[in-house]
Image: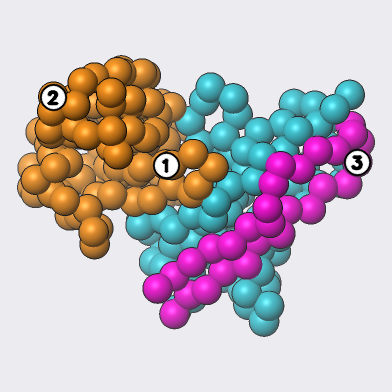
Amino acid sequence: GDSVTQMEGPVTLSEEAFLTINCTYTATGYPSLFWYVQYPGEGLQLLLKATKADDKGSNKGFEATYRKETTSFHLEKGSVQVSDSAVYFCALSENQGAQKLVFGQGTRLTINP
Amino acid sequence: GAVVSQHPSRVICKSGTSVKIECRSLDFQATTMFWYRQFPKKSLMLMATSNEGSKATYEQGVEKDKFLINHASLTLSTLTVTSAHPEDSSFYICSVLYRVATDTQYFGPGTRLTVL
């Protein structure tokens, strides 16, 4: 079946550091790919998404590019802030309607001032 | 984004009792809602898809008689954990599917269930 694998956390960085959270996937078709973020005490929020190969999703300074050849969707940000501290989930959906999301295990990110 | 609420946020119950968790879509009508379960330091696992006015669709391995889902209105879905056992202790999260323009799932804040 479909699956998503994220890098193990927790990840701790200093403010203004460069961030990469790796995500790879296994799918039988051509999935849509998502990054969700969960801030402390809140529900998951969609951070960005990409629906086809070579698409780049971006939001709030975060970016991720849909790489079909490496089945990856790594999350990057050039300069992180303390407010970026959260848990980040990579996810896929086999159909375009964002139904039946399959999630990675989540990566906890802590940014120190 | 859409606002989704869950109630209660935390519940503690005794083994053998039933617990109902509510999921409300506060600012749009949702024909489709989802229920997930999250174990500590683990991913979210989809339990079932809840469709307004029809029976829920359960994922493989999820007992439909154990986890009763009712989606009686376009703004409310409920998950009832029947005859709860300690192994049912978990974090339960709902989401609503917002089809207009974005086709995005919006998530509730979750309910922490502890069964003693």
State how far apart marks 3 and 2 are (Cα). 49 Å
Asked if residue B116 lies in the magenta stretch, the reply is no
Q: Give residue B41's position: percent from left, percent from top.
A: 54, 42
Mark 3 or 1, which is nearer the eye? 1
Label 3 close to label 2 by CB (< 8 Å): no
Q: What residue span does the magenta drawing correspond to?
A: A1-28
**On the same chain: label 3 and label 1?**
no
Depth check: B69 or B13 in front?
B13
| Residue at 91 percent of width and 41 percent of height | A17
* Residue at image mark 1: B38
Q: Give residue A113's position: percent from left, percent from top.
A: 89, 24
The circle drawn on residue B17 is 2
Depth check: A43 or A98 in front?
A43
Q: Is residue A6 above or below residue A88?
A: below
Asked if residue A11 lies in the magenta stretch, the reply is yes
The circle drawn on residue B2 is none
Label 3: which secondary element = loop
Amino acid type of the residue that numbered disc 2 sits on in the rendered structure: Thr
Amino acid type of the residue that numbered disc 1 sits on in the rendered structure: Gln
Chain A: its colour in the image is cyan
